[in-house]
Image (cartoon, rainbow, N blue to C red):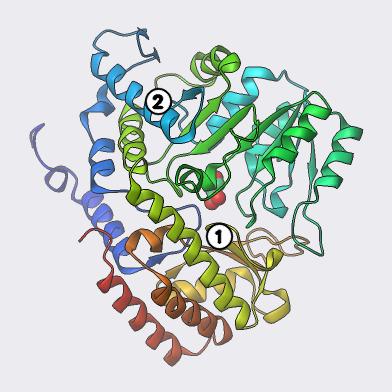
Amino acid sequence: MTFEDSLEEVDPTVAEAIDNERERQESTLDMIASENHVSKAVLEAQGSAMTNKYAEGYPGERYYGGCKYMDEVENLAIDRAKELFGAEHVNVQPHSGTQANMGVYFSVLDHGDKILSLSLSHGGHLSHGHKVNFSGKFYEVEQYEVDPETGRVDYDEIAAHAEEFDPDMVVSGASAYPREFDYARLTEIADSVDAYHMADIAHITGLVAGGVHRNPIDDGADFVTGSTHKTIRAGRGGMIMCKEEYADAVDSAVFPGAQGGPLMHNVAGKAVGFGEALTDEFQDHAQQIVDNAKVLADVFSENGLSLVSGGTDKHLMLVDLRESHDDLTGLDAEEALEDVGVIVNKNTVPGETRSPQVTSGIRVGTPGITTRGFEEEQIETIGQLIVDVLNNPADEELKSEAAEEVQRLCDDFPIYA
Ligand code: DSN
C-alpha cells in the first residue's frame, strides 16, 4: 500500500460504506428539512487538500505560515456572503450552526445573562437554551411557545414576556417552525428591553439568499447566524453575520474563544456554494423550494392531514398525526415512509405528550427533492404517495407499489447524473 493508493485500495470497508451511502441517497427521496445535496463542485472543494492546512487566525493575520491560498478562499467566502446577504461583517469559520450561535453568545453575553427564545418542543433549537445544551447551562433562559390555537408565535405575548423577564438577548429562528418570523417586530421587542436580537436562519439561509424569505439583517437584527448546508448548498458548516460594531467581538469569540483551526476545506466549500447562490438559477431554485412546499402542504391538507399552523411559508411543514392518525406515532410514520424510500424525521409537535424518540409528528421538507429537479407535478405524486402510506402503514402490497414509484422518480431525477 502506498501513500498514493485510492481509498478503495487502502480501506475498502470505508470505500464501500461511502459508495453505499451515495447509492442510498440516489435511490431514496431525502425529505428531511435540514438536509440537501451539494453540487459536485462543492463536494470537490470539501474533499480537497485544503483539509491539510492550519489557518488559525483570520485572512492577513494568521498564526501559521503558508496561508496565502487560505486567505484567498476565506476572503472569497466572506465577500460572496456579504454580497448575498448585504451583511456588514461575516465570519465563515464556525464549524456548525450551533458553533455559530456559541460564537455570538460568547461575543456579547456573560455567564448567567438572560436569553429569551423559542422552546425546542415548539420548533426551536437545542442551542437556543435547552437545558441539555451548553446554552441552557451557561445562561438563564426563558422560552416562548407557539399559540396552541394558531400554531404561530404570538408577538404580543413575546413582548410581554420580554418586559417581565428583561432578557439580554432575544433569539428568533427555529428548526421546526413552518412560518416566517416577523424579524422587525422581534428587533423592536429586543430594543424595548435593551437586548440584542440574534436571528438564527440556519434552516432558511438559502431562502434568504435567494430573496424568497425576509432578511433579518434588513429588519435590524444585531446578529444573524446560520448553517451552510440546508437550503443553501455550500456544504456542512456555520456562519455568523453581524453589524460592524460587533465584528471584533464575534471574531475573537469564534477564534480563539470557541474554536481552534478553521476547517478550511469546508470554508472552500462555503466559497463555492455562496458563489453558486449568487446566480439567477439559484434564485429560481429557492422560489421552487417554497412553491413545492406549498403544493405539498395543500396535498396533505386536502387529504385530511393536520399541519401545525395550517400550512407553510417556507421549505418545511410539520404534520401533527394526533388528529388524523391517533395510533400512528411519528416513529411509526418515519419507519413506514422509509420502507418505501421516503426519508423524513419524526418530530415533536406543540403540546407533545410522547417522548422525543417516539413523537406524534413528522417534519417534511422540500430542499433535497427540489435540488433533484422536482416541480409541482412530482410533488403532487409524492404527496399523495405519502398520504397513502400513512393511511395504510401495514399494507405491504401498497407499500411495494409505492416503493416502485419512488424508484421511478429517483431514476428520472438523479442527484448526480
Ligand atoms: N439538526 C438540525 C435540524 O434537523 O433541524 C438542526 O441543527
Q: Quadrant of residue 110?
A: top right
- Work out whether residue 381 or residue 192 is closer to the camera in this orientation and state it: 192
In the rendered structure, find residue 55 and report the number of the disc placed on it.
none
Q: Earlier in the sequence, mark 2 or mark 1?
A: 2
Give the total number of marks visible in the rendering: 2
Q: Position of residue 241 (x, y in %)?
A: 53, 28
Examine the rendered structure and indicate whether residue 364 appears above or below residue 204: below
Amino acid type at image mark 2: Ile
Picture residue at 65% right of the left edge, 82% below the top: 304
Image check: 246 left or right of 15? right
Q: Could you tell whether 11 is left or right of 148 in the image?
A: left
Give neighbour class at mark 1: few <14, some 14-19, many 20+ (Cα, 10 Å): many
The residue under the point 37% across, 43% down is 277
In front here: 21 or 312? 312
Distance CA(mark 2)–CA(mark 1): 28 Å
Vertical arrangement, residue 166 with respect to residue 402, above or below = above
Residue 159 seen in the figure: yes
Give the secondary structure at mark 1. Answer: strand
Q: Residue at x 60, y 58 (%)?
A: 313
Q: Residue at x 33, y 62 (%)?
A: 372
Q: Is residue 184 above or below residue 69?
A: below
Q: Which quadrant holds the N terminus? A: top left
Quarter of the image where one finds residue 397 = bottom left
Residue 215's image quarter?
A: top right
User: The C terminus appears in which quarter of the rendering?
Assistant: bottom left
Residue for badge 1: 316
Q: Is residue 321 left or right of residue 401?
A: right
Q: Which residue is mark 2?
A: 78
Could you classify mark 2 by the number of other residues whose Cα lies within 10 Å: few (under 14), some (14-19), or many (20 or more)?
Answer: many
Q: What secondary structure is marked by label 2?
A: helix
Look at label 1 and name its amino acid: Leu
